[in-house]
């Protein structure tokens, strides 16, 4: 039954919703490729609080194998801020995947270059 | 199931499509280093279908498979008579050409207040068909595996048919197969096209799972891994490539505590395994033995 | 015109590094009729050993070169014993995939020892480029060119003027006949692997000291360029490997200048694909493995 429902969903068209924006700011902890990250979420310019956020990361080559286990983010100090600690295999370019659950469901993709000081957006 | 387990199982499913397509060519006697390109063709085609043209996913996936098969046939036609390393290098060259074409591919359209579409090396973001329909990761996982099981059923049926025997004859010795009256060129072209379609289906699903693709996702690493999975798992049965994927991804995920050493351990294990089982764990003899017991 | 000449000069310099890589690759392929995917990664590992030694002790270039060559040779011997010796008869796919598995091993070993994406490597020559009229030539390129010529001459002597060379050529012609006449194919293969990896190690050292940096990408890069040059040169022939390497370098330098890096690579693969599909007479496409 669930599957039939799914097929119905597959054949419908979509309704556009207002999109969530995200940015990431990480600091290298000095221990092998563990980064402390602050994620800021906003929707239509307003900070988005109260989302259930999990943070994962893939490498550009073979994203299906080179991925890290997603971690749940905690609420941060300011509205719309979340904190998470990422344990990466190595520094370099990572595609960070932010999955939102709860009131807002979404999957946001951001690209960052992880260096030995922190993150910089990928060119 | 938690998000992590769903993610790992989905990745195993997605990888299995490319591994099966590489395995199919391996059974027909050829090593392809190029299946990743058809995976990429499928990913781009299906992404364009749903995100830019507004097609439903099933239609976009079918179009992706057709395009994948066509691309593979196009590569296959001039290389039909090549054997061994020459065929392997030709597939690698074709796959790298396609990857560079993805890097040069810019086609974006305005949807709402943003521009959607492939943007060269910047990738193709916003393939949000699943999210827009509220399809949960667990449902997506079910879909991937239902399709994979469907593909496996077809493979297992073919294996026990005349076509399967012909295919193995081709893989064993193409000259002998030719002299036995098998239309080797047509069969090989069919195998290549089927492999392309299969890889493209995997790519179509991957694009929608990830919502974002970029040319580097489809580099040679993916192709060589797929080939390795088929050989590690075994040439005797279509379960071989699946076993290969499960062993690699499964072992990688299970040994996170060994982080940093796991490829050293795993790489060595594979090399040693192939010393004793050069046609993989589930090779023809093992499969025959299991069949005779059953 | 001056651009054309300068590009040709740059292409020759680049091509001599490709020729060195292709020489090692071709030696292995000629004797074993197998493609060794771990060829480049073994070179990379040798260069990483040298980089590691440099960071720990700061020793001089000559020692670094020795370490790079020794490291590559050891890695090559390891690859031969584990991936190629057990699969001497048949099982070409298994040998290739096994060498790929060891590639993964080498890459992880290297990133484990030196985890950053890029390390500085001491420069081969600290001064500026030479100028010849309006043309410039880097001293490093000149060294590479001379090294390629010297290695070639030495290989020629070894292959055609020594007992070992006779054995190698006998194995290339027919392993079965060589075995019958008392040559140990296994021993010859191992020695050829060691020799080829040593040449690769030298090429790798010259490349990283010329670029003054080393990254794990060196592994895949060396395998790909070595294989491409070998293919262009017609597979399994040493003069062909040199011609293929130089042709690849010249073509890359010119198309880089006129078309940019993406089209440069595209044309490299297109050329290879067309060559394979058309099969000109110098490409012996029957006995690939």
Image (cartoon, coloured by chain):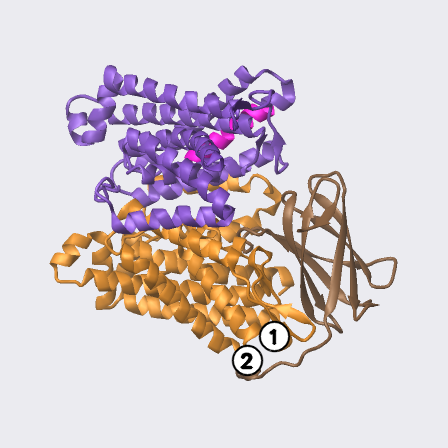
Chain colours: A brown, B orange, C purple
**Which residue has dot 2 on it?**
A10
Q: Are discs 2 and 1 both within one chain?
A: no
> Can residue B209 be seen by looking at this rendering?
yes
For label 2, the SS is: helix
Q: Is residue B101 above or below residue A92?
A: below
Q: What quarter of the picture does the C terminus of chain B occupy? A: bottom left
Using the image, name the chain to which the residue with label 2 belongs.
A
Write the residue at 75% across / 38% down.
A30
Write the residue at 72% across / 39% down.
A116
Q: Which mark is residue B219?
A: none
Write the residue at 52% across / 64% down.
B206
Judged left or right of residue C264, residue A32 is right
In terms of secondary structure, what is the magenta stretch mainly? helix
**Which residue has dot 1 on it?**
B135
Q: Are marks 2 and 1 in contact (CB under 8 Å)?
A: yes
What span is in magenta?
C37-52
Using the image, name the chain to which the residue with label 1 belongs.
B
> Can residue B272 be seen by looking at this rendering?
no
């Amino acid at each position: 039954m669930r599957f039939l429902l799914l097929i119905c969903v597959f054949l419908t068209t979509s309704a556009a919703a207002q999109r969530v924006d995200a940015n990431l700011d990480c600091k290298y902890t000095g221990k092998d490729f563990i980064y402390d990250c602050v994620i800021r979420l906003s929707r239509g310019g307003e900070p988005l609080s109260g989302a259930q956020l999990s943070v994962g990361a893939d490498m550009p080559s073979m994203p299906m194998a080179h991925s890290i286990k997603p971690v749940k983010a905690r609420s941060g100090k300011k509205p719309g801020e979340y904190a998470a600690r990422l344990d990466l295999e190595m520094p370099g370019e990572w595609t960070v995947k932010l999955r939102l659950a709860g009131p807002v469901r979404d999957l946001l993709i951001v690209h960052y270059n992880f260096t030995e000081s922190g993150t910089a957006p990928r060119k | 199931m938690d998000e992590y387990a769903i993610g790992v199982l989905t990745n195993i499913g997605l990888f299995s499509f490319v591994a099966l397509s590489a395995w199919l060519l391996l059974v027909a006697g050829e090593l392809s280093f190029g299946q990743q390109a058809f995976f990429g063709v499928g990913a781009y085609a299906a992404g364009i279908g749903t995100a830019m043209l507004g097609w439903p996913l099933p239609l976009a996936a079918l179009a992706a498979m057709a395009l994948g098969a066509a691309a593979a046939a196009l590569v296959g036609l001039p290389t039909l008579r090549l054997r061994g390393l020459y065929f392997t290098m030709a597939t690698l060259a074709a796959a790298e050409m396609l990857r560079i074409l993805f890097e040069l591919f810019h086609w974006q359209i305005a949807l709402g207040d943003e521009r959607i579409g492939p943007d060269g090396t910047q990738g193709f973001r916003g393939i949000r068909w699943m999210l827009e329909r509220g399809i949960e990761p667990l449902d997506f996982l079910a879909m991937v595996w239902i399709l994979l099981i469907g593909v496996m059923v077809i493979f297992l049926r073919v294996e026990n048919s005349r076509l399967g025997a012909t295919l193995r004859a081709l893989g064993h010795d193409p000259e002998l197969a030719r002299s036995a009256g098998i239309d080797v060129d047509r069969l090989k072209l069919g195998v290549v096209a089927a492999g392309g379609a299969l890889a493209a289906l995997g790519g179509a699903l991957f694009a929608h799972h990830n919502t974002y693709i970029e040319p580097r996702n489809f580099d040679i690493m993916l192709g060589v891994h797929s080939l390795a999975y088929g050989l590690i798992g075994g040439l005797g049965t279509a379960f071989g490539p699946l076993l290969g994927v499960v062993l690699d991804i499964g072992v990688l995920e299970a040994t996170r505590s060994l982080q940093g050493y796991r490829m050293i351990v795993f790489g060595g294990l594979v090399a040693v395994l192939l010393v004793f089982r050069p046609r993989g764990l589930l090779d023809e003899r093992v499969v025959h033995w299991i069949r005779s017991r059953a | 015109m001056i651009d054309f000449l300068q590009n040709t000069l740059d292409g020759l310099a680049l091509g001599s590094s490709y020729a060195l890589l292709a020489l090692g690759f071709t030696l292995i392929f000629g004797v074993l009729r197998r493609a060794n995917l771990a060829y480049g990664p073994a070179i990379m590992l040798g260069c990483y050993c040298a980089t590691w030694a440099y960071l720990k002790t700061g020793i001089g270039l000559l020692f670094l070169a020795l370490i790079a060559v020794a490291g590559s040779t050891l890695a090559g011997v390891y690859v031969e014993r584990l991936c190629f010796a057990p699969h001497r008869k048949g099982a070409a796919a298994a040998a290739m995939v096994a060498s790929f598995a060891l590639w993964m091993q080498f890459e992880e070993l290297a990133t484990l020892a030196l985890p950053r994406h890029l390390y500085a490597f001491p420069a081969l020559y600290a001064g500026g480029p030479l100028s010849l009229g309006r043309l410039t030539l880097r001293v490093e390129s000149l060294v590479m060119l001379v090294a390629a010529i010297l290695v070639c001459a030495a290989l020629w002597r070894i292959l055609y003027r020594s007992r070992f060379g006779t054995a190698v050529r006998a194995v290339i012609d027919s392993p079965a006949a060589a075995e019958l006449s008392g040559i140990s194919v296994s021993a010859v293969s191992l020695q050829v692997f060691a020799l080829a990896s040593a040449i690769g190690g030298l090429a790798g050292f010259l490349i990283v000291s010329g670029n003054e940096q080393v990254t794990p990408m060196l592994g895949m890069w060396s395998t790909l360029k070595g294989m491409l040059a070998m293919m262009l040169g017609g597979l399994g022939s040493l003069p062909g490997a040199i011609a293929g390497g130089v042709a690849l370098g010249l073509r890359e330098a010119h198309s880089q200048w006129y078309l940019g890096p993406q089209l440069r690579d595209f044309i490299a693969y297109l050329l290879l694909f067309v060559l394979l599909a058309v099969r000109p007479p110098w490409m012996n496409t029957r006995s690939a493995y």
